[in-house]
Image: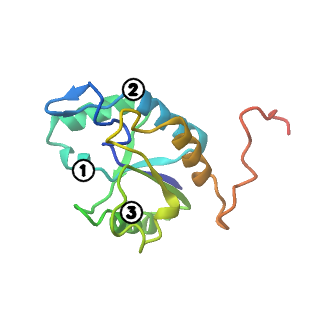
Amino acid sequence: MKAIFLDVDGVLNHGYLHEKIGSIVGIGDEYVERLQRIVTATGAKIVLTSSWKTYKDCDPKWDYLIEKLKKYGLEIYDVTKDRGDNRGYGILKWYTKHGVTDWVVLDDEEFDDYMPYGILSHLVKTSYYTPDGGLQDEDVDKAIEILNRSSDGKTDKRRKRKDEPANK
């Protein structure tokens, strides 16, 4: 199984986005479309690491997130169980328990426990605090590359390029 450990703020939006859900910044369609490109290219499942997971089952913001993803054929497979500043441990625990083979972390923050748990080489760091923040095209390319690595850390040569004929 391949997994995308997804933060929302700074990945599916940024501080300059005008869309709002209640008092918080909403989610931009262009960022969800970029996430869709990653999922389509890799078959990865989305695991929510974001503080947005606290909205699950009790807040209209959760329904908003689910509908935004659904619009692009995406869904949240699961959520990590960590709280606050131990996000790296939550990621480690989740991918170990679920037999994940390849994974990427999409986040605008680098938590203190990312380095000790070996997460930095899987991190695609975005930005919340810039007008061109959120998930960008170059981030999509990097995430796809990370997810399509083989277990020896090299790019998996078995995957087909988009422009490669089907009979090769």
Viewer-proximal residue, 83 or 118?
Answer: 118
Residue under label 1 = 51
Give the SS element for disc 3: helix
Residue under label 2 = 29
Q: Earlier in the sequence, mark 3 or mark 1?
A: 1
The answer, for residue 148, to whether it is visible in the render is: yes
What quarter of the picture does the C terminus occupy? top right
Who's the residue at 67% across and 67% down the image? 152
Q: Give the Cα separation between the discs numbered 3 and 1.
A: 13 Å
Give the colouring mode of the picture.
rainbow
Who's the residue at 58% across and 52% down the image? 147
Give the SS element for disc 1: helix
Q: Earlier in the sequence, mark 2 or mark 1?
A: 2
Across and down, in percent, residue 68 comes to 34, 29
Examine the image and state in which quarter residue 30 appears.
top left
Q: In the displayed structure, would residue 92 be above or below residue 166? A: below
Q: Give the Cα separation between the discs numbered 2 and 3.
A: 26 Å
Across and down, in percent, residue 95 comes to 44, 64
Q: Which disc is residue 91 wearing?
A: 3
Viewer-proximal residue, 12 or 156?
Answer: 12
Q: Amino acid at mark 1?
A: Ser
Q: Residues within 10 Å of mark 2 (few under 14, many from 20)?
A: some
Give the SS element for disc 2: helix
Q: In the displayed structure, would residue 127 be above or below residue 100? A: above
Q: Residues within 10 Å of mark 3 (few under 14, many from 20)?
A: many
Q: Amino acid at mark 3?
A: Ile
Nearest to the eye among marks 2 and 3: give it: 2
In screen coordinates, is 146 left or right of 93? right
Q: In the displayed structure, would residue 162 be above or below residue 118? A: above
Who's the residue at 14% across and 42% down the image? 58
Q: Give the Cα separation between the discs numbered 2 and 1.
A: 20 Å
Examine the image and state in which quarter residue 37 appears.
top right
